[in-house]
Image (cartoon, helix red, strand yellow):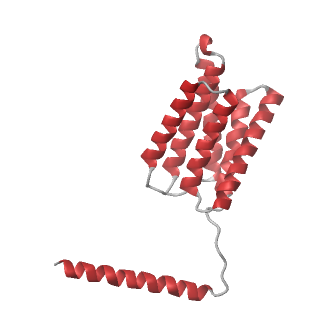
């Protein structure tokens, strides 16, 4: 499976903006308050997390991650916490999902956290200047499409890379020989 691309992220931003705007307009009038925004945040965040899990090359823990995300969203819904904290918790869940499934270094995960903060700022700016929920969601997810440019891992540079690669080869070779020896002694 190939990694997500920026163009795919832009398409995701457009889909999330359209879906979020349509969902918000379809919510019945008695719910048009903070509950409607909470529902929009939960549904959009969950679908984005499912998208991330689907595009990740990691296979371990997907069901656990999705289940934990759903449990967290459900608990937050029933605790009736302030909307700003509700949003931060859902953004944190997205950040943790991306950090676990797309990065292997702390610096990359922190850069992703900064990207989420920038996305929230751009979405808030768009809403304050236009009053459009569509543009607010669009700006947030458009900035999130940039996560593909964050390095997946940082490499340690050594003075003698050939020595390090020989050590890796030697370890792999000895592991393979040990595995063959174990297989031959089973019969």
23 sits to left or right of 142: left
The residue sitting at 66% across, 17% down in the picture is 33
Q: Nearer the viewer, residue 72 or 57?
A: 72
The residue sitting at 69% across, 51% down in the picture is 146
Question: Where the C terminus falls, by quadrant?
Answer: bottom left
Q: Nearer the viewer, residue 7 or 61?
A: 61
> Residue 61, image x and y in percent?
44, 51
**Count of numbered circles in the view:** 0
Q: Can you see residue 74?
A: yes
Residue 173 quadrant: bottom left
Residue 128 quadrant: top right
The residue sitting at 75% across, 45% down in the picture is 118
Compared with residue 173, is residue 5 higher up or lower down, i.e. above or below?
Answer: above
> Residue 179, image x and y in percent?
31, 79
143 sits to left or right of 3: right
Compared with residue 12, is residue 174 higher up or lower down, i.e. above or below?
Answer: below
> Residue 64, image x and y in percent?
44, 45
The residue sitting at 77% across, 39% down in the picture is 122
> Residue 143, image x and y in percent?
71, 45
Residue 185 quadrant: bottom left
Q: Nearer the viewer, residue 79 or 31?
A: 79
User: Which residue appears farthest toward the right when viewing the image?
Assistant: 129
């Amino acid at each position: 499976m190939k990694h997500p691309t920026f163009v795919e992220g832009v398409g995701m931003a457009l889909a999330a903006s359209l879906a979020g705007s349509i969902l918000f307009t379809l919510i019945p009038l008695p719910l048009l308050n903070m509950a409607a925004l909470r529902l929009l945040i939960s549904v959009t965040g969950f679908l984005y997390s499912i998208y991330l899990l689907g595009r990740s090359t990691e296979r371990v823990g997907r069901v656990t991650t999705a289940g934990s995300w759903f449990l967290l969203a459900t608990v937050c819904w029933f605790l009736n916490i302030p909307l700003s904290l509700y949003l931060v918790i859902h953004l944190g869940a997205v950040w943790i999902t991306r950090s676990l499934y797309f990065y292997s270094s702390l610096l990359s995960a922190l850069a992703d956290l900064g990207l989420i903060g920038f996305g929230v700022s751009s979405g808030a700016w768009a809403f304050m200047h236009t009053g459009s929920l569509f543009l607010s969601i669009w700006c947030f997810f458009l900035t999130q499409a940039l996560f593909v440019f964050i390095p997946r891992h940082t490499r340690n540079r050594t003075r003698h890379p050939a020595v390090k690669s020989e050590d890796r080869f030697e370890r792999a070779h000895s592991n393979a020989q040990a595995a063959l020896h174990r297989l031959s002694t089973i019969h």
